[in-house]
Amino acid sequence: MTTALDDTASVGGARRLAPGKPAEFGEGITLAVLVLFVTLICGLPMALLFKVGLTGPAGIDLAPLAEAMANRSVQTALWNSLESSVLSALLAVILGALLALAVGLTDVRAKGPLVFCLLLPMMIPPHVIAIAWIQAMGPGSPLLKPLGLAPEMGETPGIYSVTGLVSLLALQHAPLVFLILRAALRALPRELADAARVCGAGGPRVLLRITLPLIAPSLLASFMLAFVAALGNFGINALLGIPARYTTLPVLMWRRLASFGPDVLPNVAVISVVLAVVTLLAVGLQSLLQRRLRASLIGLPQAPLAYALGRARLPLEMALWGFIAVTLALPFAALVATALVPTYGLALTPATLTLDNFAEVLWRQGVTLRAFANSTLTAAAAAALIAAVAIGLGHLMVHRTGRTRQLAGLASAQADIAFAVPGLVVSIAFILAFLKPLPGLGLSLYGTLWIILLAYVAVFLSVGLKPVTAAYLQMDRSLEDAARVAGAGYLKRVRRIFAPLVAPAAASGAILVFLTAYNEVTVSALLWSSGTETIGTTIFNYEDSGATTLAAAMSTVVVLATVAVMVAMNGLARHVPAGSIPWRD
Amino acid sequence: MKKLLIAATALLFAGQVQAADVTGKLVLYTSQPNEDAQQTVDAFKAKHPGVEVEWVRDGTPQVMAKLRAEIEAGAPKADVLLIADTVTMESLKKEGRLLAHPAADIAGYDPAIMDKDKTYFSTKLITTGIMYNTAAPVKPTSYKDLLKPEVKDKLAMPSPLTSGAATIHMVALTGNPDLGWAYYEKLAEQGANPQGGNGAVYKAIAGGEKLYGFMVDYMPIRGKAQGAPVEFVFPEEGVSAVTEPVAILSTAQNPTAAKAFVDFLISREGQELAAKQGYLPAHPAVTPPAGFPARETIKLLPFDPAKALEGDAANKAKFTEIFGG
């Protein structure tokens, strides 16, 4: 039936669509369905959150907001959130920039494995990273203790502090900065640096006077991104912040809702509005900066630079691999060591070594198996759905003009907002929107896997959309015109022309979505229920109930699975637009 | 003799009917640690293979928050609740959310820990006392020992906002004329930071991050048996106790299986399982596990559930005021 409709439409559709002209029938429906769907899961819940937070029975009412802001714990949490996010973003920028300069400008060897290892922390869930560091730095540290370097018994480990929290956030977000800056270094107009060199400027001088000023906008933009990411982080903030008596906004919201239930929902909605506003301000500022960045740098990505370091190369390589050993191998080794002892607090020796925790997690605990199944299922379904939406929306956004483009752009903007605001804020918006039974159906989505799946689609749509729009930008439009002249209707063109061409980009986006959703805890922390546990909530729950050895065992399994998926993703590398797979050139 | 025979046949018959009828899905919300919950469920399923049990674990307040959200959503999923304290059960009973199970056999139990309307049933005694790391310089025997200068900043305790047992302990200690709220204020001065549940406290002390703390008995007693460097003390003032009651929700989808689950927990077999897991069983005739003193030597702090329920909100507010959070 659709083919018939498409064919009639295509009789008159052989011409190029002029701006403002009505779209083809199939295209119109696709547009309507996509925009409606995205609005329903991204726009509406957020709008409802703002409505609950900012209005009363008689229109706009800022009293609850003022009341929340006057609350001492909210003030402290807001201040703590801002402080830890600014400090950690600064540190992440310094760290990320140093790494990007070292890898992006010099001739250090083994760049592939180096970049893979440097980006690994970005893919490992923050709560797992926090658990690993706690074990690596505590008095019971299975690694520091035998070396005599562990803190004394009863001494609170330094990691439970603002410094510890800020450092872990910075380590988690430095790869983000590294990625952005490496791309910026690639796009640098090379002539400037060459000219300076010809004029006799040495390496450090070129760096300070030419390179750094040119990448300054990227530095600022990556600072804002790291700031926003830190603001929404839950795992590190909860696991390190709570023992350090350093409560941030996401933790405050989670604690109130988890301990008091829906009675405090309006109160928590008001606090989420505060967090959402801070985030959106930061994102707005960031996109402003990024627009400036586009104007200031000309040139397509080029082959990586490789200034010869000569004798300095080996020390730099040793420093880079040393950094990886300390930030990656050390906490992971601690995690594995904890997973291998029968009870927490016992030192790992050949006599105490046991695989029992792995057996418990992988075979005996019904909840773990369910969590693995739930996370795999929801993450895969969300990834597939996002890929499908992205193929349609990306095309309408990039290859169309006028009203169609505007509407598609509106949907994409809603997805960007849902991605930018912290996952916890989205899940509170989802509880508000979907807790009560749906009108007409009498069924509530709350407590089902559907609500987690839809929340994943809402939050990660933006991640999957980006590589697909990039692929559309590179695609020649004459392909579509040719198909249209040949009489192919919209759906047929999608099926035969666009979808196959952007499929690799959609697939790499989908895998990124899968990895992110598979490992997340912020979105599902408030949405999980009986039978719908996710990997993230299960690990968090083990750690929270004192079953640290089980949490460590499950974390180990998850890290290994993540690395396996990342390695598998390398196989896609040749078929996707440059930059779709973060750790590949 | 004839009567006895009839009774025996009836019993046998009843047993058969029960085993045949108990099938379907059973949803359990519990605050037991994962491993124990899984063992309990496995043991129950061995007896009733027709039942598919789905269970969720979280701290008692979190379990309640989840349940309240589901009630709000119009679809409470749990059939059975197995949570820390009777105070929470009392409040649910008041709201008419619990289903009575008149056929439950509670003969032999202390009536003080069972609801006379048979809407909830205590399954074990979980006392809260003091735990310490064996590397600690002070070996506390009284709550007041925790106010010594050597203990400063090395003290951990669970939060009543996260743990049902901690709520009862707070009510019991602050109601003791010798200790009172002044004692809690001094604990705050000692640097206690009650933010998590018992699990978090256990982890901190076993890992050596802290050296002393309030703690439920079974975690350190079990940990010590496995080689962890920890000790549990029944302080001289006494311990508080929760009874981990089980109850069936009035909205239960599968009341038959729910009743079978309750029957299993309070049966001899269920009580022996609890003892095997390292808990003090609620049934006085079942031998307590190794590591516990003789049952009659355990001194309980006086505690009134009705009064506790009445003052619950005020107590928690006062606690938050002292410790922040």
Image (tube, coloured by chain):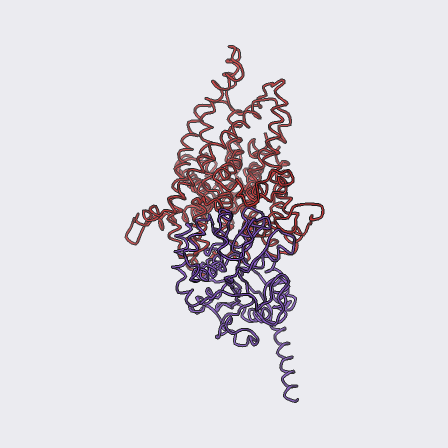
Residue A441 appearing in the image: no
Q: Residue B97's x, y, as percent?
A: 45, 68
Q: Residue furthest top?
A: A199
Q: Residue furthest bottom?
A: B2
Q: Residue B103's x, y, as percent?
A: 55, 77
Which image quadrant for residue A282? top left
- Colour that chain A carries in the picture: red
In this view, B63 is above or below A497? below
Q: Residue furthest right?
A: A350
- Colour that chain B carries in the picture: purple
Residue B169 appearing in the image: yes
Q: Residue at x 53, y 73 (%)?
A: B110
Q: Residue furthest left?
A: A58
Q: Residue A540's x, y, as percent?
A: 54, 49
Residues A230 and B181: in front is B181
Q: Residue B136's x, y, as percent?
A: 57, 49
Residues A215 and A514: in front is A215
Which image quadrant for residue A532? bottom right
Q: Residue at x 47, y 28 (%)?
A: A218
Residues A202 and B199: in front is B199
Residues A33 and B102: in front is B102
